[in-house]
Amino acid sequence: MSMDPKTKTALQGVGVVIFMGAMAWASVPLYDWFCRVTGFGGTTNVAESGSVEILDETIKVRFDASKERGMPWEFRPMQLEVEVRFGEDGLVFYEAYNPTDEPVAGTASFNVAPYGAGLYFSKIQCFCFEEQLLMPGERVEMPVTFFVDPALLDDPDANGTNHITLSYTFHQIELTEEMQAMVDAAAPAQTQTN
Protein backbone atom coordinates (compact mmCIF):
# COMPACT_ATOMS: atom_id res chain seq x y z
CA MET A 1 0.00 0.00 0.00
CA SER A 2 1.47 3.26 -1.14
CA MET A 3 0.98 6.63 0.55
CA ASP A 4 0.34 9.78 -1.32
CA PRO A 5 3.30 12.22 -1.23
CA LYS A 6 1.53 14.76 1.03
CA THR A 7 0.75 12.13 3.70
CA LYS A 8 4.26 10.73 3.51
CA THR A 9 5.78 14.22 3.94
CA ALA A 10 3.45 14.98 6.86
CA LEU A 11 4.37 11.70 8.62
CA GLN A 12 8.06 12.35 8.05
CA GLY A 13 7.65 15.85 9.54
CA VAL A 14 5.84 14.45 12.59
CA GLY A 15 8.59 11.84 12.95
CA VAL A 16 11.29 14.53 12.88
CA VAL A 17 9.43 16.60 15.51
CA ILE A 18 9.03 13.55 17.79
CA PHE A 19 12.70 12.60 17.33
CA MET A 20 13.89 16.16 18.09
CA GLY A 21 11.64 16.33 21.17
CA ALA A 22 13.01 13.02 22.44
CA MET A 23 16.58 14.20 21.88
CA ALA A 24 15.90 17.48 23.71
CA TRP A 25 14.34 15.57 26.62
CA ALA A 26 17.29 13.14 26.81
CA SER A 27 20.04 15.73 26.31
CA VAL A 28 20.30 16.88 29.94
CA PRO A 29 20.66 13.40 31.51
CA LEU A 30 22.96 12.27 28.69
CA TYR A 31 25.16 15.36 29.02
CA ASP A 32 25.26 14.92 32.82
CA TRP A 33 26.26 11.28 32.40
CA PHE A 34 28.92 12.22 29.82
CA CYS A 35 30.40 14.88 32.12
CA ARG A 36 30.51 12.52 35.11
CA VAL A 37 32.19 9.76 33.11
CA THR A 38 34.76 11.99 31.41
CA GLY A 39 35.19 14.85 33.89
CA PHE A 40 34.29 17.20 31.05
CA GLY A 41 33.36 20.71 32.13
CA GLY A 42 34.95 20.26 35.55
CA THR A 43 32.42 17.70 36.76
CA THR A 44 33.78 15.71 39.68
CA ASN A 45 33.38 12.07 40.63
CA VAL A 46 31.48 10.81 43.66
CA ALA A 47 33.08 8.06 45.74
CA GLU A 48 31.69 5.89 48.54
CA SER A 49 35.06 5.81 50.31
CA GLY A 50 38.60 7.07 50.00
CA SER A 51 41.31 5.90 47.63
CA VAL A 52 43.10 2.61 48.27
CA GLU A 53 46.39 4.10 47.06
CA ILE A 54 48.07 7.08 48.76
CA LEU A 55 51.24 8.52 47.25
CA ASP A 56 53.90 10.75 48.76
CA GLU A 57 53.47 13.32 45.98
CA THR A 58 51.18 16.24 46.81
CA ILE A 59 48.86 18.61 45.03
CA LYS A 60 47.36 21.90 46.13
CA VAL A 61 43.59 22.23 46.13
CA ARG A 62 42.11 25.73 46.18
CA PHE A 63 38.55 26.60 47.17
CA ASP A 64 36.24 29.23 45.76
CA ALA A 65 32.68 30.34 46.59
CA SER A 66 30.13 32.48 44.80
CA LYS A 67 26.39 33.10 44.83
CA GLU A 68 23.77 33.46 42.18
CA ARG A 69 22.62 37.05 41.78
CA GLY A 70 19.94 37.76 44.35
CA MET A 71 20.96 34.93 46.70
CA PRO A 72 20.94 36.68 50.12
CA TRP A 73 23.31 34.32 51.94
CA GLU A 74 26.90 35.01 52.80
CA PHE A 75 28.96 32.07 51.56
CA ARG A 76 32.71 31.44 51.77
CA PRO A 77 35.35 28.71 52.04
CA MET A 78 36.84 28.49 55.52
CA GLN A 79 40.17 27.37 54.01
CA LEU A 80 41.41 28.96 50.79
CA GLU A 81 43.88 26.18 50.01
CA VAL A 82 45.10 22.84 51.31
CA GLU A 83 47.90 20.57 50.19
CA VAL A 84 47.05 16.86 50.12
CA ARG A 85 48.84 13.74 49.01
CA PHE A 86 47.40 11.99 45.97
CA GLY A 87 44.81 9.51 47.24
CA GLU A 88 44.67 11.03 50.74
CA ASP A 89 41.28 12.12 52.10
CA GLY A 90 41.00 15.88 52.50
CA LEU A 91 38.43 17.63 54.69
CA VAL A 92 37.53 21.29 54.33
CA PHE A 93 34.60 23.43 55.38
CA TYR A 94 32.52 26.12 53.75
CA GLU A 95 30.48 28.57 55.82
CA ALA A 96 27.03 29.85 54.93
CA TYR A 97 25.11 32.53 56.79
CA ASN A 98 21.54 33.74 56.31
CA PRO A 99 21.52 37.42 57.39
CA THR A 100 17.84 37.87 56.52
CA ASP A 101 14.78 37.56 58.74
CA GLU A 102 13.29 34.88 56.46
CA PRO A 103 14.18 31.20 55.96
CA VAL A 104 16.15 30.78 52.73
CA ALA A 105 16.81 27.51 50.88
CA GLY A 106 19.63 26.92 48.45
CA THR A 107 21.43 24.33 46.42
CA ALA A 108 25.03 24.37 45.27
CA SER A 109 26.44 23.69 41.84
CA PHE A 110 30.13 22.98 41.49
CA ASN A 111 32.99 22.54 39.09
CA VAL A 112 36.69 21.85 39.10
CA ALA A 113 39.41 23.67 37.20
CA PRO A 114 41.33 22.77 35.20
CA TYR A 115 38.49 20.87 33.58
CA GLY A 116 40.60 17.78 32.86
CA ALA A 117 41.21 17.33 36.58
CA GLY A 118 37.50 16.80 37.28
CA LEU A 119 37.84 13.16 36.27
CA TYR A 120 40.37 12.67 39.10
CA PHE A 121 38.70 14.75 41.81
CA SER A 122 36.36 12.57 43.89
CA LYS A 123 33.99 13.83 46.56
CA ILE A 124 33.10 11.41 49.35
CA GLN A 125 30.85 13.77 51.33
CA CYS A 126 29.55 17.14 50.20
CA PHE A 127 26.88 19.65 51.14
CA CYS A 128 26.16 19.96 47.42
CA PHE A 129 24.50 16.53 47.46
CA GLU A 130 21.50 17.99 49.34
CA GLU A 131 19.35 21.10 49.35
CA GLN A 132 20.17 23.40 52.26
CA LEU A 133 17.79 25.40 54.48
CA LEU A 134 19.03 28.20 56.69
CA MET A 135 16.73 29.82 59.20
CA PRO A 136 16.91 33.59 59.84
CA GLY A 137 20.31 34.47 61.30
CA GLU A 138 21.55 30.87 61.06
CA ARG A 139 25.24 30.21 60.34
CA VAL A 140 26.46 26.73 59.40
CA GLU A 141 29.72 25.03 58.56
CA MET A 142 29.37 22.56 55.71
CA PRO A 143 31.99 19.83 55.16
CA VAL A 144 33.50 18.56 51.93
CA THR A 145 35.49 15.32 52.06
CA PHE A 146 37.46 14.52 48.91
CA PHE A 147 40.56 12.94 47.41
CA VAL A 148 42.56 13.41 44.23
CA ASP A 149 43.00 10.14 42.37
CA PRO A 150 46.67 9.18 41.85
CA ALA A 151 45.72 8.23 38.26
CA LEU A 152 45.95 11.95 37.44
CA LEU A 153 49.73 11.52 37.37
CA ASP A 154 49.40 8.91 34.59
CA ASP A 155 47.21 11.10 32.35
CA PRO A 156 49.46 12.85 29.81
CA ASP A 157 46.88 15.63 29.35
CA ALA A 158 46.59 16.37 33.09
CA ASN A 159 50.00 15.32 34.41
CA GLY A 160 51.33 18.90 34.58
CA THR A 161 48.52 19.95 36.92
CA ASN A 162 50.02 21.34 40.12
CA HIS A 163 46.82 22.70 41.63
CA ILE A 164 43.07 22.14 41.37
CA THR A 165 40.37 24.68 42.17
CA LEU A 166 37.02 23.49 43.52
CA SER A 167 34.32 26.12 43.03
CA TYR A 168 30.79 26.22 44.39
CA THR A 169 27.95 28.54 43.46
CA PHE A 170 24.86 28.66 45.68
CA HIS A 171 21.48 29.21 44.05
CA GLN A 172 18.31 30.14 45.91
CA ILE A 173 15.46 27.66 45.54
CA GLU A 174 11.84 27.57 46.63
CA LEU A 175 11.18 25.90 49.96
CA THR A 176 10.04 22.30 49.52
CA GLU A 177 7.06 20.96 51.46
CA GLU A 178 9.47 19.24 53.86
CA MET A 179 11.40 22.49 54.40
CA GLN A 180 8.18 24.43 54.95
CA ALA A 181 7.16 21.87 57.59
CA MET A 182 10.51 22.46 59.35
CA VAL A 183 9.94 26.23 59.23
CA ASP A 184 6.40 25.84 60.57
CA ALA A 185 7.61 23.53 63.36
CA ALA A 186 10.29 26.06 64.38
CA ALA A 187 7.88 29.02 64.40
CA PRO A 188 6.16 28.21 67.76
CA ALA A 189 9.56 27.75 69.43
CA GLN A 190 10.71 31.15 68.19
CA THR A 191 7.48 32.79 69.34
CA GLN A 192 7.95 31.38 72.86
CA THR A 193 11.54 32.72 73.11
CA ASN A 194 10.54 36.24 72.04
Image (cartoon, rainbow, N blue to C red):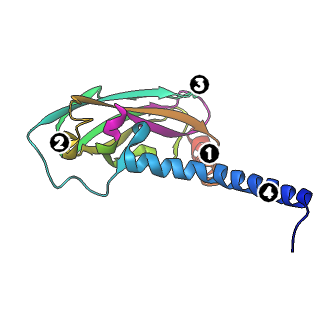
Q: Name the residue under label 4.
A: 12
x, y percentage for residue 39? Answer: 38, 43
Rounded to the nearest angstrom, the CA distance separating label 2 from label 4 is 55 Å
Kind of residue sitting beneath label 3: Arg
Which of marks 3 and 2 precedes in the sequence?
3
Q: Name the residue under label 3.
A: 69
Which mark lies nearer to you, 2 or 3?
2
Which mark lies nearer to you, 2 or 4?
4
Look at the image and give the residue range highlighted in magenta.
96-118
Rounded to the nearest angstrom, the CA distance separating label 4 from label 3 is 44 Å
Disc 1: CA contacts within 10 A as few (<14), some (14-19) or many (>=20): few
Which mark lies nearer to you, 4 or 3?
4
Q: Name the residue under label 1.
A: 187
Q: Given contact means CB atoms under 8 Å apart, are the residues at marks 4 and 3 in contact? A: no
x, y percentage for residue 137? Answer: 51, 31
Which of marks 4 and 2 precedes in the sequence?
4
